[in-house]
Amino acid sequence: MQSTEINRPREPQQQPAMHQWFETLRLPLLTLTGALALTSLALLSTGVSPLQAYRILLFGAFSSPGRSSDMIMLAAPLLLCATGLILTFRTGLYNLGVEGQLALGAVAAMLPLRLLPDLPAPLLWTLCFACAATGGALWALLAAGLRLYAGVSEIFAGLGLNFLASGLALYLVLGPWRRSGSASMSGTELLPRDLWLPTINTLRLAPLAPIIAIAALAIVWWVVRRTRWGLELRAVGLNPGAADRLGVPAHRRIAQAMAACGFLAGMAGAIQILGVFHQLIPNISSGVGLLGLLVALLVRADPRWVLPVSVVFASFTVGSVQLPLALGVDSSIAGVLQGALVLFALLARGLLARPG
Amino acid sequence: MDQTTIFVAAVLAAAAPLIFATMGETLTERAGVVNLSLDGTILMGAMIAFAVALNTQSVLLGFGAAALTGALIALVLCFLSLSLRQSQTAVGFVLALLCTELSSFLGAPFVRVPGPAVPFLPVPGLANLPVIGPILFRHDLAIYTSFLLVPLVGWLLFQTRAGLTLRALGERPQAAYARGVPVVPMRYLVTVAGGALVGMAGAVYSLDLKQGWSYRHTFGAGWIALAIVIFGGWRPWRVALGCYLFAALEIMALRMQSVLSGLPTQVFQVAPFALMIAVLVLVNLAGSTHMSRRIGDLPPSLRRPAQALVDRLAAPAPAALGQPFERP
Amino acid sequence: MQVSVHNLSKSFGSVRANDRLTLRFEAGKIHGVLGENGAGKSTLMKLVAGFLRPDEGVIRFDGRDAALRGPGDALRAGVGMIHQDPLDLPAFTALENLLCATPRSAIASWAEGRRLLVELAGRLGFTVEPEMPVARLSIGQRQQLEIIRLLARGARVLILDEPTTGITAEQTRALFAALRQLAAAGNTVLFVSHKLEEVAALCDTVCVLRAGRLVGEQMGMPVPQAVLLGLMFDTAVAAVRGAEAPPAGDGGTLEPPVTRPVAGEVVWRLEGVTAREGAVTLRNLNLEVPAGRVLGLAGLDGSGQQLLLRLLAGHARPDTGRVLVGSTDLTGAGSRAYRAAGIEYLPADRLAEGVIGALSLSDHFALQQTGRLVDRRQAERAAREAIAAYGIKATPVTPINALSGGNQQRAMLALVPPRCRGLACEQPTRGLDVASARTIWHSLLARRADGCAIVFASADLDELIEYSDEVLVFFAGQISPPLPRAQLSVARLGELIGGVGFAEGGTT
C-alpha cells in the first residue's frame, strides 16, 4: 500500500527555461493554492479575513520570544518523530504507532525519575533518554513483530498499540503515580525544578531539546545518504522481493527501521516529560506523533525538507493560539491548514502523474 | 427494573454510533477499499448534524446532512485513491486529521449550545414487556435503526446477489471485471454509501447519545470503529458483537469509577484494544500454513474440534483490501 | 454463433502482438488456435472476449460489428473466456461463483442456480458441487465451474486459454468430451493451445499464429504434425527433417532424467527432489550440473522450468529429496544461503523481482558493497565499468526503470558478482532485440568460461539449441532426459514441447 515513485524517461530537454521552471513549480503551486483555497473558505465562512488570519498563523509564533520558544519546544519533538518516520516511510511502512511509541517513551522516561531521583541531574537525564528510547523502540518492535510474524498490518497494530500506550499513561496518572491527595486528569506531580532540562528563565526554552532533535536529523540524514543500511531500507521499501534477491535481509531491515523510529519517538517522549510538561499527563503525546506523520507524508521522507516543514508546522500551531483572542476564531484552523497542505500535495501528485 | 436490565439497555444504546460507523466501514472494506478517515468523518458528521438540526430544528435534516457529509468525504477519498491512485492509507489518514480539525474550527460556535435531540420513542405495547421491553424497546429511532442495521448489512452481504458482487470487488476485482462489473464506479458507490453511514454515526453522537457538540466530541471513536471491523473479521454479526463488547467495557469503566474510586478502571477502556491485538494475532496464525501443520500433528480425536475452532476464528481480510485495481 | 475478426491489430509498446489478423470461426465447431509462447494467441482471445481493445480492425459476432468496451459487453453478446488461471473467486462457494454478477434474467434465484449447477455438471460429466468452496477445488474443477457459469449466462462462444495446463488426464478427458458435446449443440469453441496432440485430438479446424501474424489459416483437421510445427516455429526445412527425425516418433515414451557421470566439479546436485508450486509438480528429479555447463530448459510457460530454476536458487523448497550446491547440502535453506554459496537467480520479470526500478545502477552496486558506508565513488566506478563492459546505454545515476528492456537485462547481469558459481536465468533474452540478445549471451558465455554453470529457461528454440550444452524439455511437470546439443533440432524440440513422446496425461 505504498505509492512508489514513478520515473519516466525524460524527453530531451529543449524547452525554454520558463517552461522548466513551471514544471518544477507546478506541484508546490498546486498544493499551496488548493490548501489556501480550502482554508480561506473555512475562514470566510466564519466571517474572518483570511489575510489577517494567515498573518497570525505565519508570524504569530515569532511575535515574542516566549512564543518563539514555545514553537521551538513543539518543533523539537515533532522533528524527532518526523525524522524517525523518514526511516519507516523509506522502508515502505506506515508507522501509525508513532504516537504510542512517543507515549511509551514518556512513560519509560518517568521510571528513572521516580526510582532514582537522587542521582545527579545530568546522569538522570541521560538515563531518562536511554529508557525512553528503549521503551519507544520496544513498542515499535512489538508492532514490527505483529506485522512480520502474525501478519497484522503495521497500521492497525500501531493504532491498537497507541491506545494501549495512552491507556497505560492514563492508568499511571490516575493510579500508582497519582498526585498525593486525589487523583487528577491533570497529571502527576510536577518534577522538581532542578530535574527539568536546563531551561532559559522566563522563556520555557530548553535548548537541549532542539539540539538533540537537530542532531538526530543530521544523523538520520547522514545514515540515509551515506550508509549502506540507509540505502538498503530504501531498497526494501521500493521492492522487497528484488531487495531480497540482491541480498538485503528485508525482514530484518523492516524491524530495524521500526525500532529506530520508535527509538527517536521515545526520545521525543522524554523531551515532553523533561522539557515541555515536566510531568506525565494522560495526553502526553498531544498529537505530536500524528503531526509528524503529516510532515513525513508532505516531504515524502526527504530529509532535506523535514526541518523547514517541521518548523513551519510548529509555528502554525503556536501562532494559531492567538487566533481566538485576536480574531475570535478557533485555533484549530492551524490543523486545517496542515492537513489541507498534505491532502492537496497528494492531489497534485496524483494529477501531475496522470498520463497526458 | 434491575441493574442488569438497565446496564444491558445502556450498552445497546451506547453502541449505536459504533454500529453505524462499523457497518459503513464493513461495507466499504468488503468492497476492497479502506476508508481510514473514520475518526474525522464521524466528527464532521456530528458537527454538521448538530448545526443543521439546530438551525432547522429538524433532527431528520441533521441526520441527512451528516450522511451527505460522510458521503462527500468518502468521495474525496475515492477520487484521490481510486482515480488518482494515491495510497488509500495516506489519503484516509490525512482526511481523518483534516476533518477532525475542520470540525473543531467550523463547530466552534456550537460548542455546548443546547439543541434538538432524537425524541425518546418507546414502542407501544412492546415497551411494557418484562425485561425485553426496557432492553430493546425503550429507546429512540436512531437506536432502533442501529438494531436493524446489523441484520440488514449481514443480509445484504451474504444473502443477496448484490452482496456477492460487492464482496467480489474486495476479494478479486479482476473476477468481477471479467463478469462485466464496472469495478471502479462500483467501488465509488459502495465507499460513498459506507461513508454516509459513518457520517450518520456522528449524528447519533451529537443528536442522541451526547446531545450537543463540543471539541473532539467523540475522540477516538473512528479509530476504535476501524479496529472493531478487523476484530469482527469483516462479518457484520461479529463486528456488532465487538461494538457491544466495547460499549459494555466502557460503561463498566464509568460505573466502576463512581463505585470503587481508586481502582484502575482504565484497564477496562484499554482491554478491547489488547483483546483486538490478541484476536488479530490469533486470526492470522489460525489461517497460516504453520497452524494447519500443527493441527495435523494432533491426536486424531482432537484434530477435528481444533480444525473447527481454527476455521471459526480465521477471518481473512478481503483478499484485495486496499489494493488498486489492475485489469487482468 | 459465428465469430470473425477483420484486420485486427494490437500493439504493446513497440511489440505488435496481433498484426492485421483476419479470421472466421464458424458455429458448431471446435477451433484450435496454435502458436508458441508470445505468438499472440492470448492477445487475440482477450480482444475477442473484450479484455483488450483493438488498435485497429473490427470484431464481428454473427456478422454484426461488436464494439466491446469490456468483458461485460462480450458476455452480453454471448462470448465468454476461461483463463488459464480461472478468474474466479476462491473465497466463494461454487454456487456463489455461479451467481456472482450473473443477471437475474439468466438465473432467477439461488434455488434455480443450484438446480442449474447440478444439472449442467451432470450433463457435462463435471464433478463440481454447489456448496464446495472454490479455494478447495482443483484447477480442473475451477475450469469446469467457469464453463458452467458461462453457459448458464447464455454464452454461445467459449474461449479456453491453455485449459489443459495443470489438470489431470481424467479431467482433460472430461473437458474434451464436454467441449465436443457443446460444439455438437451449436456452440463455438475456441481452443488455444501449444500442445499439438490435444489440438489433433479435439479440434475441427486449426489456425496458427507466429509473432502476431496469421501463418496458417483455418485448416480443416487433420493436418500433419510436421506442417503445424513448421508453421509454429518457422522452420520449413526443419519441419521436413522433423518429420523423419527418429527419436520421439519411435513410439517409446521418454524416461525421467537420470544422474549421468560427469567430469569436473559439480555445481548443483538434485537427489530425488519432489516439489510443487501452483499447478506444477516435479517428481523424483535427479540432476547434476557441472561447472562450465550450459543447461537449457525448454517447455511452455508453467510446465515446471520456472519451478526448477527457483529450486536451484533456493526460492522454492523441495517437499522431499536433497539439493546440494557443491558438496554442501542446502535443502530447505533460504535463498540467502544459496547466494552465499555463489548461486545467483535472474528472474524473467526484471522490474518486479530482479532490480529496483527507482534506484540507479550505481545504487545497485552500492547495495552489493560490504562496508557499512556507501562508497559512492567505488559504486560509480563499478557502474561505469559495467556500462562499458556490457554496453549499457545509461549513466551510472539513471534510474533503472528509465532504461530499455535490453539495458535492464544487461544491468541485471552486470550485477552478478564475479565469484558466482551457478546462474539460474529465467528467459534471459525475453523481449530483447537480436543485438541485445547477442550481447547478453556474450557475457553469459564469458561467465561460463570462468567455470560458472548456467541453467536457463527460454521459449526461443533457436536460442536453446545455439547456446545449450544440453537441453531438458518440460511437459506438464514431466522432464525429458538431458538431450545433448548434437541431437537437437528445432523440429524435435517443438515436438517435445508439444508433448509428443511424453507419457500420456502428464502428472496425476
Image (tube, rainbow, N blue to C red):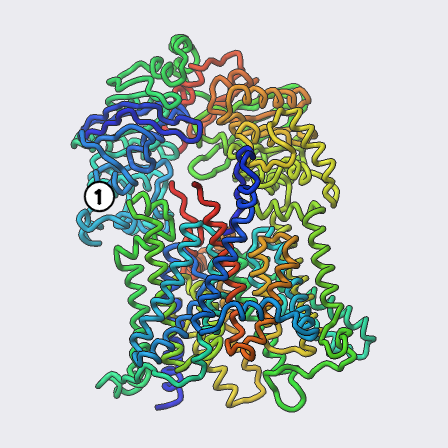
Query: From this viewpoint, is residue A141 visible?
Result: no
Q: Which chain is indicated by disc 1?
A: C
Above/below status of A328 relative to C353: below
Give the percent coordinates (x, y) of residue B194: 36, 63
Q: Quadrant of the C terminus of chain B?
A: top left
- Residue at label 1? C153
Spot occupied by residue A52 in the image (x, y as percentages of width and height):
54, 70
Which of the pair C418/B45 is nearer the observer?
Answer: B45
User: Residue A90: image x %, image y %?
Assistant: 60, 51
Image quadrant where one finds the N terminus of chain B: bottom left
Q: How many marks?
A: 1
In the rendered image, the residue lying farthest to the right is A120
Mark 1 surroundings within 10 Å by alpha-carbon count, few (fewer than 14), some (14 through 19), many (20 or more) = many
Residue B283: x and y, percent?
47, 60
Depth check, front residue: A137 or C112: A137
What residue do we see at 62% from left, 68% from top?
A: A59
Please say whether residue C447 is visible from this viewpoint.
yes
Towards the viewer: C495 or B68 = B68
**Residue plotted at (56% across, 80% down):** A325
Seen in the picture, residue A23 relative to A38 is either above or below; the reply is above
* Residue sitting nearer the eye, B311 or B169: B169
Picture quarter containing residue C490? Answer: top left
C455 sits to left or right of C233: right
Q: Secondary structure at mark 1?
A: loop
Amino acid found under the numbered disc labelled 1? Arg
Q: Residue at x 38, y 51 (%)?
A: B171
